[in-house]
C-alpha cells in the first residue's frame, strides 16, 4: 500500500510517499481502508520531534518510532479480528489515532475496535476526518474542564484554527455568548461559524477590552496566562489548549500557584480520545449544529505541502487529506 513514511525528524522534506505492507489486525482490531485524513499541529510536532519531550512520550529519541504519521482518520472497515463485535466490513468509521499508534497517512490502518465510531452520515470521508482531534479537544475544553453553561460568556483565542473553529460552534450549540479572537484575514470565516463578537488581535488586545468572561479557551497561548486576569471573571476559568511550548510547560507546572495568585481557575487541557465523544460530535454534526470548516483538500502524496501550509498559519479551519 502507499503511505507517507518518516525515517528521521525534520521539516516536511523528511516525508516520502512509499510502498509498505498492508498491516494485519489482531483479534480485537479492525483493518480500515483509509479514505480521508487531516493534518493538525500534533502531526508537525511529531514530524519535527519538538518539543523534545514528545520523543520521550512516543519513543524514538534520535529517530522516530512512529514511521507513519496521521492522527485524524475516516474510512471503511475492510476486515475485522475474530473478537470484534461492533463493526462489520463496509462500515464507515472515523477515529482519533493519537493513543492507538497513528498511521492515518496511508491507504490502510489497523485500529483497536474501541477507538473507532460510526462516521457522521452527512459528511464525506475527508470532511469527517477533520473532526476527531480538534473536535474532541474543543468539546472536552468547553464541556468537561470549562463546565460551560447556557448564557455564559466565553472567549475563544485561536478561533480560526482547527480546535478554535470547532470550539466556536460547540460553544454556540451549548448556548453560550461567544467572543472569538483571530487575525484579520480570517475574521469573515470565524463570523460565519456563528461567533457573536470578533476581536482582530492585530488591531485590538483581547486582554484589554474591558469585558469579562466566565470561560477562556486558549488554543493560541503565546503570552502569559496572567495577562488574561483583567478579562476573566473572579469565578471564571482559563483553559490552555495549545500554543507555545514555553507557555504550555510554564502553565502546566504553575497552574496550582497561578490559580491561588489569580483567584481564578487555571487549567491545561490534555484531551483524551474516546468513542462517546466521537458519538456526541457525530450527533451534533448530523443535527446541523456543527460543521467542519474545510479550507482545502490535498491528495495523500501532498501531505508535506499540507503540513507546510499549516505551519505557515495559512489555513482557515482545517485541511483535509483525500486518500
Ligand atoms: N491540549 C490538547 O489536548 C490539545 C489537543 C489538540 C490540539 N492541541 C494544541 O492546540 C493548539 C491549536 O491547535 P489547532 O489544531 O487549532 O492549530 P491551528 O489549526 O494551527 O490553529 C492555530 C490558531 O492559533 C492562532 N495563532 C497562531 N499563532 C498565533 C500567535 N502568535 N498569536 C495569536 N494567535 C496565533 C491562529 O490564528 P491566526 O491564524 O488567525 O493568526 C489559529 O487560530 C496547538 O498547539 C495544538 O498542538 C492541544
Image (cartoon, rainbow, N blue to C red):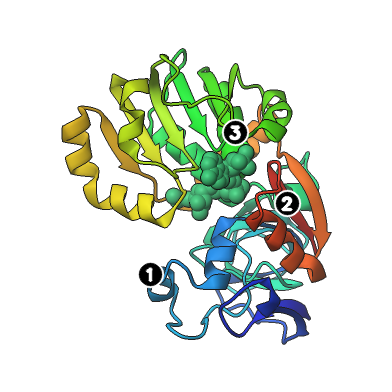
The residue mark sitting in front, 2 or 3, is 3
Please tell me whether mark 1 sits on a helix, a strand or a loop. Answer: helix
Mark sitting earlier along the chain (3/1) = 1
Please give the name of the residue rendered at 58% of the width and 69% of the height, measured from the top-left corner: 102
Foreground pick, 28 / 41: 41
Residue beneath disc 3: 182
Please tell me whether mark 2 sits on a helix, a strand or a loop. Answer: strand
Foreground pick, 28 / 23: 23
Image disc number at residue 53: 1
Q: Is residue 285 left or right of residue 271?
A: right
Please give the name of the residue rendered at 52% of the width and 22% of the height, measured from the top-left corner: 174
Relative to residue 217, is residue 179 depicted above or below?
Answer: above
Foreground pick, 118 / 46: 46
Image disc number at residue 319: 2
- Measured as percent of width and height from the top left, residue 105 is found at 70, 69
Q: Is residue 149 left or right of residue 299?
A: left
- Measured as percent of width and height from the top left, residue 282 is found at 64, 40
Mark sitting earlier along the chain (1/2) = 1
Task: Examine the image and state in which quarter residue 312 appears.
Answer: bottom right
Label 3 – label 1 distance at C-alpha: 29 Å
Please tell me whether mark 3 sits on a helix, a strand or a loop. Answer: strand
Task: Examine the image and state in which quarter residue 222 appears.
Answer: top left
- Measured as percent of width and height from the top left, residue 322 is found at 81, 60
Foreground pick, 245 / 20: 245
Q: Are marks 3 and 1 in contact (CB under 8 Å)?
A: no
Amino acid at each position: 500500500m502507499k503511505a507517507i513514511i518518516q525515517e528521521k525528524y525534520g521539516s516536511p522534506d523528511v516525508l516520502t510517499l512509499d510502498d509498505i505492507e498492508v498491516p494485519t489486525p489482531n483479534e480485537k482490531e479492525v483493518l480500515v481502508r483509509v479514505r480521508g485524513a487531516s493534518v493538525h499541529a500534533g502531526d508537525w510536532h511529531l514530524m519535527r520531534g519538538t518539543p523534545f519531550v514528545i520523543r520521550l512520550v512516543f519513543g524514538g529519541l534520535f529517530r522516530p518510532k512512529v514511521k507513519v504519521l496521521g492522527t485524524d482518520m475516516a474510512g471503511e472497515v475492510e476486515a475485522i479480528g475474530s473478537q470484534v463485535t461492533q463493526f462489520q466490513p463496509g462500515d464507515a468509521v472515523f477515529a482519533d489515532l493519537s493513543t492507538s499508534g497513528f498511521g492515518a497517512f496511508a491507504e490502510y490502518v489497523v485500529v483497536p475496535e474501541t477507538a473507532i465510531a460510526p462516521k457522521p452520515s452527512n459528511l464525506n470521508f475527508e470532511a469527517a476526518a477533520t473532526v476527531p482531534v480538534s473536535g474532541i479537544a474543543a468539546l472536552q475544553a468547553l464541556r468537561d474542564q470549562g463546565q460551560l453553561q447556557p448564557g455564559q460568556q466565553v472567549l475563544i483565542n485561536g478561533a480560526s484554527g482547527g480546535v478554535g473553529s470547532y470550539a466556536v460552534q460547540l460553544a454556540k450549540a451549548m448556548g453560550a455568548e461567544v467572543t472569538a479572537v483571530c487575525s484579520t484575514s480570517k475574521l469573515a470565516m470565524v463570523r460565519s461559524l456563528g461567533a457573536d463578537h470578533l476581536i482582530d488581535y492585530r488591531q485590538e488586545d483581547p486582554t484589554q477590552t474591558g469585558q469579562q468572561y466566565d470561560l477562556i479557551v486558549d488554543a493560541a497561548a503565546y503570552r502569559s496566562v496572567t495577562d488574561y486576569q483583567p478579562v476573566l471573571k473572579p469565578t471564571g476559568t482559563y483553559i490552555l489548549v495549545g500554543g507555545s511550548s514555553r507557555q504550555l510547560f510554564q502553565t502546566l507546572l504553575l497552574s496550582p500557584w497561578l490559580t491561588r495568585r489569580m483567584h481564578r481557575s487555571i487549567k491545561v487541557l490534555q484531551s483524551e480520545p474516546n468513542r462517546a465523544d466521537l458519538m456526541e460530535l457525530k450527533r451534533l454534526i448530523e443535527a446541523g449544529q456543527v460543521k467542519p470548516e474545510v479550507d482545502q483538500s490535498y491528495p495523500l502524496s501532498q501531505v508535506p505541502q499540507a503540513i507546510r501550509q499549516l505551519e505557515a498559519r495559512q489555513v482557515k479551519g482545517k485541511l483535509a487529506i483525500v486518500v
